[in-house]
Image (cartoon, grey):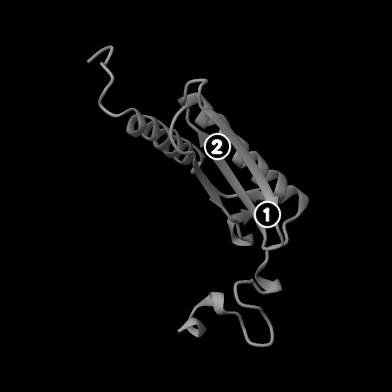
Amino acid sequence: MNGNTPYAGVPGKTQAGHRAETDVPDLSPEQKESLRDSITAIASQTREFLPDEYVVGSKVADDGSGPQAQVSVQPPVGHPVSAGFQPDLEDFDGDDLVTHEEAEVARGLAASAAMQVKQMMGDNITPTAR
């Protein structure tokens, strides 16, 4: 059954679990900068939604399988949450990353991080307001 998945590799060309060289996007320096700017915008917007006790970080890496971008949030208690993606060349219009989902991703990350705290704290806390 593994032969039916893209992860099985192409016999004689690609090892199992690896991408073919033609599948790895080669971004220009301007495209990489646009990707960094988009991830930085998501991290910045996420920080605006959360109190200072939450740690928000971002990174862009290229590990040989193409560029990967990730934003992570470590709440004061609970598990960290993150969102990431691996862009393809079709995600760019010239040198600019075509995505208008930064605010939506930031809201989702902030909500997930807040939910982690709520789940860890349980119902034992008296609300300060209703």
Q: Name the residue under label 1.
A: 94
Q: Mark 2 points at which residue?
A: 42
Judging depth in this view, the residue of 93 and 51 nearest the camera is 51
Q: Split into 4 quadrants, where in the image is the C terminus?
A: top left
Amino acid at circle 2: Ile
Q: Residues within 10 Å of mark 2 (few under 14, many from 20)?
A: many
Q: Could you say where residue 13 lies in the image, as x and y percent from the top left?
A: 69, 83
- Closer to the observer: label 2 or label 1? 2
- SS type, badge 1: loop
The residue furthest left is 130
Q: Could you say where residue 76 lies in the image, as x and y percent from the top left?
A: 47, 27
Q: Distance from label 2 to label 1 (Cα)?
A: 21 Å
- SS type, badge 2: helix
Within the image, what quadrant is residue 126 found in?
top left
Q: Could you say where residue 89 lies in the image, as x and y percent from the top left?
A: 64, 61
Q: What residue is drawn where x is 56% and y is 32%? A: 56
Amino acid at circle 1: Gly
Number of the label disc, if any, that sits on residue 64: none
Left or right of 95? Residue 110 is: left
Q: Could you say where residue 42 lies in the image, as x and y percent from the top left?
A: 55, 37
Left or right of 128? Residue 75 is: right
Judging depth in this view, the residue of 120 and 14 nearest the camera is 120
Q: What residue is drawn where x is 61% and y is 77%? A: 16
Q: What residue is drawn where x is 51% and y is 40%? A: 102
Q: Residues within 10 Å of mark 1 (few under 14, many from 20)?
A: few
Q: Taking 27 as reference, is 72 above or below it?
A: above
Judging depth in this view, the residue of 121 and 103 nearest the camera is 121
